Amino acid sequence: MQTGYTDLDGAKKFLGDCSHETIYRRVRAGLLKKYKLGSKTLFRISELDALPTCATVQPAGNDNAEPAAA
């Protein structure tokens, strides 16, 4: 488990290049807590590690297609 804190850009990269809005949506939903150090917003890496990543690889084409007859 990783420890420490990261800023918003680090959180975006950690979760697979999420948007700012996705990060804050998770904060509003109570899935992620933000911390303040002066005017800087930070996120605990161990809490980010518990979340699913944003990056998903989508296969090309239709996954539900029947295999072609030989």
Image: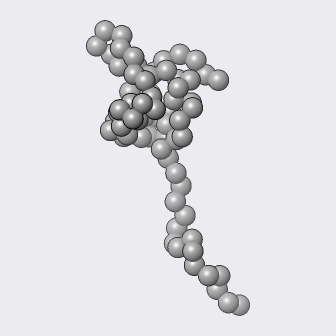
**Residue 23 seen in this snapshot:** no
- Judged left or right of residue 1, residue 30 is left
Quadrant (top left, top right, bottom left, bottom right) of the N terminus? top right
Question: Residue 39, how many percent across, how many down?
Answer: 28, 13
Looking at the image, the residue that sits furthest to the bottom is 70
Looking at the image, the residue that sits furthest to the left is 39
Looking at the image, the residue that sits furthest to the front is 30
> Which residue occupies the foreground of this view, 11 or 32?
32
**Which residue is pictured at 53% across the width and 55% down the height?**
57
Question: Residue 65, how many percent across, how many down?
Answer: 57, 78
Q: Quarter of the image holding residue 38?
A: top left
**Which residue is pictured at 52% across the width and 73% down the height?**
62
**Residue 57 seen in this snapshot:** yes
**35 relative to 15, above or below:** above
**17 relative to 49, above or below:** below
Looking at the image, the residue that sits furthest to the right is 70
The colour scheme applied to this rendered structure is: one colour
**Which residue is pictured at 38% across the width and 27% down the height?**
8
> Which residue occupies the foreground of this view, 66 or 30?
30
**Which residue is pictured at 57% across the width and 74% down the height?**
64
**61 relative to 36, above or below:** below
Quadrant (top left, top right, bottom left, bottom right) of the C terminus? bottom right
Question: Residue 68, how many percent across, how many down?
Answer: 64, 86
